[in-house]
């Protein structure tokens, strides 16, 4: 049966991963949740650093961990949804810097209110996201290659345009320009909780995760995202607007990259044009560690948030333990391989039990 606008609903099996029938064993219901492995890993890692690093146990340390997690988690929330939809965006890290550069250079060089530069950067982020999605759905070229091309274009433009306009690879400060204080309050302010300073990005991160979780679990769009990631051809056959869903997901990544870029701009007042390279892999790792399958169709916003939290704990825990921080990247690689192996094993076990 068609809905009021004439689009046929996707069948129920294409929706979010089932939580198990009321009469099914608790273990089966737990295995059906993609974020369970990440939750267990987060608890184990937290207890480990809690035991070996006394400085890790303070409330101030938790605030720092949450801040580090939010820097990855904000964009990872969108990247995770995109991966559930069966696509990748390798340009997400560079996009963060691109939108920060766009806002600051437009504001500074045209003597605009910083609000104007920020809004123009937002519109540009939607355009880049739309272009990525449009090229993927119209050409049929894998998103890996499309966004890899976008990555190089934006990376080169970031450096080339910044050096052409400013004569350097960093932008001038704009903290004395109109609109900067109010925008800083939105994107880079702090507040106190029981005497502990907390960055506003932590609140925004949790809010974005809640919105993504609601979309994936409670809306028709969420059902469509899982359907498209599971089998795009089957989803299209039952009336799911595959092209609109994928383009919307790429635009969501663009928006969250813009938000992260605005935080960097208003936190540090200047932007290094060569930044952002490699960040895209951290977003993907957070999603995969959180239970998102690389093949699409499986994952959750909460799982991606737990993956980002694991990233924050590990990054800061190594410092608090007094270890060489160069080991952090090695740990990320091991964690990614283990996460992929665990996710595939859990999926296979859950499927076997269901059968």
Image (cartoon, rainbow, N blue to C red):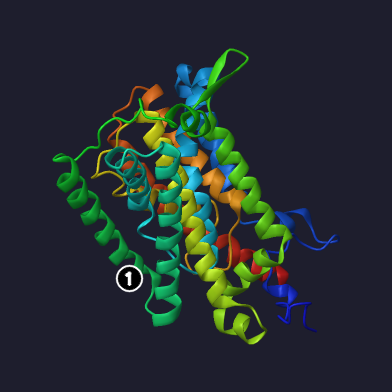
Spot occupied by residue 237 in the image (x, y as percentages of width and height): 63, 87
Spot occupied by residue 36 in the image (x, y as percentages of width and height): 62, 50
Q: Nearer the viewer, residue 67 or 155?
A: 155
Q: Residue at x 62, y 53 (%)?
A: 212
Mark 1 — residue? 145
Spot occupied by residue 215 in the image (x, y as percentages of width and height): 66, 57
Looking at the image, the residue that sits furthest to the right is: 23
Q: Is residue 65 visible?
A: yes
Q: Identify whether 29 is placed above or below 12.
A: above
Q: Nearer the viewer, residue 124 or 78?
A: 124
Looking at the image, the residue that sits furthest to the front is: 111
Q: Label 1 neighbourhood size at 10 Å, few (<14), some (14-19), many (20+)? A: some
User: Which quadrant is home to the N terminus?
Assistant: bottom right
Q: Residue at x 25, y 33 (%)?
A: 172
* Image-quadrant location for residue 324: top left
Q: Identify whether 240 is placed above or below 262.
A: below
Q: Is residue 54 left or right of residue 334?
A: right
Spot occupied by residue 201 in the image (x, y as percentages of width and height): 52, 34
Q: Residue at x 73, y 82 (%)?
A: 6
Q: Nearer the viewer, residue 32 or 74?
A: 74
Q: Is residue 31 visible?
A: no
């Amino acid at each position: 049966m068609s809905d009021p606008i004439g689009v046929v609903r996707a069948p129920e099996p294409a929706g979010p991963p089932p939580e198990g029938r009321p009469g099914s064993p608790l273990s089966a219901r737990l295995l059906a949740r993609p974020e369970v492995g990440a939750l267990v890993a987060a608890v184990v890692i937290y207890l480990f650093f809690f035991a070996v690093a006394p400085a890790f146990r303070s409330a101030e340390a938790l605030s720092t961990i949450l801040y580090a997690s939010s820097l990855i988690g904000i964009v990872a929330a969108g990247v995770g949804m995109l991966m559930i939809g069966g696509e990748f965006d390798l340009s997400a890290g560079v996009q963060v810097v691109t939108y920060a550069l766009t806002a600051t250079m437009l504001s500074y060089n045209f003597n605009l209110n910083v609000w104007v530069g920020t809004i123009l950067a937002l519109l540009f982020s939607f355009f880049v996201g739309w272009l990525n999605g449009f090229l993927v759905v119209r050409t049929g070229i894998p998103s890996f290659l499309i966004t890899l091309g976008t990555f190089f274009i934006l990376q080169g433009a970031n450096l080339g345009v910044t050096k052409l306009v400013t004569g350097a690879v960093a932008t001038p400060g704009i903290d004395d320009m109109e609109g900067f204080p109010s925008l800083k309050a939105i994107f880079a302010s702090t507040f106190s909780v029981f005497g502990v300073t907390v960055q506003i990005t932590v609140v925004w991160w949790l809010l974005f995760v809640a919105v993504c979780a609601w979309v994936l679990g409670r809306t028709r769009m969420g059902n469509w995202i899982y359907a498209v990631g599971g089998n795009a051809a089957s989803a299209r056959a039952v009336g799911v607007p595959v092209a609109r869903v994928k383009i919307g997901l790429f635009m969501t990544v663009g928006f969250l990259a813009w938000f992260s870029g605005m935080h960097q701009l208003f936190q540090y007042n200047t932007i290094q044009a060569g930044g952002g390279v490699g960040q895209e892999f951290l977003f993907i790792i957070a999603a995969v560690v959180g239970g998102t399958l690389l093949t699409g169709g499986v994952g959750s916003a909460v799982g991606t948030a737990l993956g980002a939290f694991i990233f924050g704990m590990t990054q800061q825990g190594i410092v608090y333990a007094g270890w060489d921080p160069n080991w952090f990247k090695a740990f990320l690689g091991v964690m990614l391989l283990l996460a992929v192996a665990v996710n595939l094993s859990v999926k296979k076990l859950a499927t076997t039990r269901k059968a």
